[in-house]
Structure formats: C-alpha cells, structure tokens
Image (spheres, helix red, strand yellow):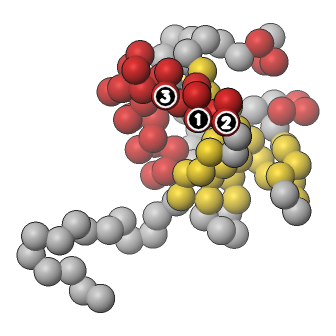
C-alpha cells in the first residue's frame, strides 16, 4: 500500500536486527543508558551497511569470525560503540537479518 501524507515512510530495503540471546539484550540496554547517541549511530551503521569495514566496524577474526547459528554458519561482525563498548552481530544475507549476539559497555574479554 502506498503511504499517504502523514504516514511513516518505511525503509526501502531494510535489514532486521534481532537479539540472539538475553545477554545481548541486557548489554544493549546498558549501552543505551550509557551512550544513547553513539548506540543510535551504531544502529544506523549496522542496519545501513552491515559489512562495511572502517575504524569502528569490522568482521571479527579467527574462531570468532564465523559462528554456527540455527541451520548454518554466519559471519560475525563487531561495531565499536564507545571506547570500550561493543556490539557483535551475525549477518544473514539471505534473510537480510542481523542477529545481535553480544553487547556491552566494556571491551569483550573473548577478543583479548
């Protein structure tokens, strides 16, 4: 249905961001409380171009770079929200879905 004046205009080809677990939800909420503007920029970057590589956004390396999820393996990416805060997400190109696997205000210990 075509939108009318006053209607919300939907994004033409959206990516959907879904929490993969409760820990990711908790971390997302902590980041939102701590740095809402940065998290908003992260959300726009991730859902705008989930495979963009720059200083803040990149694919994780080694065993963290590919994660088994449901019926297949997906690439896992990271976005640096703040100096220590990060979000990790899986990219499902076929379904245009991003699975939030981890979020937190501190640097993730698994990458050290």
Q: Element under label 3?
A: helix
Residue in view at x 59 percent, y 51 percent: 18
Residue in view at x 25 percent, y 68 percent: 9
Q: Nearer the viewer, residue 18 or 73?
A: 18
Is any part of residue 89 visible from this angle? no
70 relative to 5 in the view: left or right = right
* Residue 81 place in picture, x, y as percent: 49, 24
Q: Residues within 10 Å of mark 3 (few under 14, many from 20)?
A: some
Q: Vertical placement of 50 versus 40: above or below? A: below
Q: CA distance from mark 3 to mark 2?
A: 11 Å
1 relative to 86 in the view: left or right = left
Is any part of residue 83 visible from this angle? yes
Q: Element under label 1?
A: helix
5 relative to 41 in the view: left or right = left
Residue for badge 3: 29
Residue for badge 2: 22
Q: Nearer the viewer, residue 42 or 17?
A: 17
Residue for badge 1: 25
Q: Element under label 2?
A: helix
1 and 2 marks in contact (CB < 8 Å): yes
* Residue 112 place in picture, x, y as percent: 80, 11
């Amino acid at each position: 249905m075509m939108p009318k004046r006053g209607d919300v205009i939907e994004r033409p080809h959206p990516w959907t961001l879904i929490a993969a677990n409760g820990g990711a939800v908790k971390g997302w909420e902590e980041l939102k409380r701590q740095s809402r503007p940065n998290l908003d920029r992260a959300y726009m970057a991730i859902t705008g171009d989930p495979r963009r590589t720059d200083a803040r956004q990149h694919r994780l390396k080694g065993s963290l770079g590919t994660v088994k999820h449901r019926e297949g393996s997906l690439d896992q990416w990271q976005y640096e929200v703040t100096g220590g805060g990060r979000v990790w997400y899986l990219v499902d190109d076929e379904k245009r879905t991003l699975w939030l696997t981890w979020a937190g205000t501190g640097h993730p210990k698994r990458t050290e």
